[in-house]
Image (tube, rainbow, N blue to C red):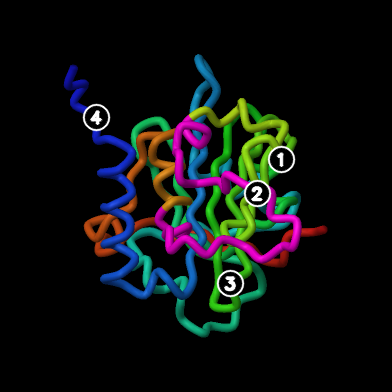
Amino acid sequence: MDTGQPSADDVYEHYRQLIGDTMLHVHLSWTVMLPDDGAVSPTLQEVGTRLGAGASYELREATSPDVVHLPLCRPGPAWIVDRSDASIVLYGDHPGAVALRLLSAGTRVYSAHWNVNSVNSLSLAIDGEILLMIDGLFPGRPQDHPNLMWWPELTAMSNFFLDYEDSDFLGRDDGWDWQAGFLTAIELATGVRLDRGWLDTERPYLMLSRPIPD
């Protein structure tokens, strides 16, 4: 039966092409906040308040997403932040574990991050607790992640995890694009898509006045 929704393979191929056609393979931080069932989605100002944890923030209008990659001197982290239906999207600096906990009050927070040094994580935080944080190069097996039931769309992606115990910590060598896999897992869970149209559109810009406390 055709549900009108793209298959996991189609979504994966979309992100494989997007990453190949842009500089996203070098660095990306993409976070989607999905409110709990029946909960009201936070405003962009409330997102700034959560992340600031008592510090001030500045929310600017209509800025190109490219600004987050410029070598600017900022007092604290910064993100492009915008709505996608009921969800809130953040694109820019890596939120980190503390920020994910702050953001996840009353929401499910899905986050993908990697940098030029291959430091990476795919994370899920719910109601102030980080339930999953997975390395794309060393994903392990499904049974290595006891909270995986909270992300069923990830479980359904047959190629995401290894099918053997990586006891020597050699990492994956099957050629599967784990970066595209990260973004596929988030879109399947939230319905929010990152594409060239999103990257080419000016959006609100959130800056904190200081680093997020550890």
Q: What separation in Å lies between label 2 and label 3 (alpha carbons)?
A: 17 Å
Query: What's the distance in space between the residues labelled 1 and 3, CA to CA?
Result: 21 Å
Q: Which residue is mark 3?
A: 118
Identify the magenta region. Answer: 153-180
Which quadrant: the C terminus? bottom right
Please name the amino acid that badge 1 sits on: Asp
Main SS class of the magenta portion in the image: loop
Q: Nearer the viewer, residue 54 or 30?
A: 30
Q: On the image, numbered disc 2 is attached to which residue? A: 140
Q: CA distance from mark 4 to mark 1?
A: 30 Å
Left or right: 40 as drawn, with respect to 50: left
Mark before the other along the chain sequence, 4 or 1: 4
x then y, percent, for residue 61: 38, 59
Query: Which residue has dot 4 on it?
Result: 5
Q: Which residue is mark 1?
A: 144
Whether residue 137 sits left or right of residue 176 in the image: it is: right
- Label 1 Cα neighbours within 10 Å, binned few <14 / some 14-19 / many ≥20: few
Q: Is residue 19 left or right of residue 57?
A: left
Question: In the rendered structure, are the residues bearing label 2 and label 1 in contact, judged by CB atoms less than 8 Å apart?
Answer: yes
Q: Nearer the viewer, residue 107 or 22?
A: 22
- The secondary element bearing badge 1 is classed as helix
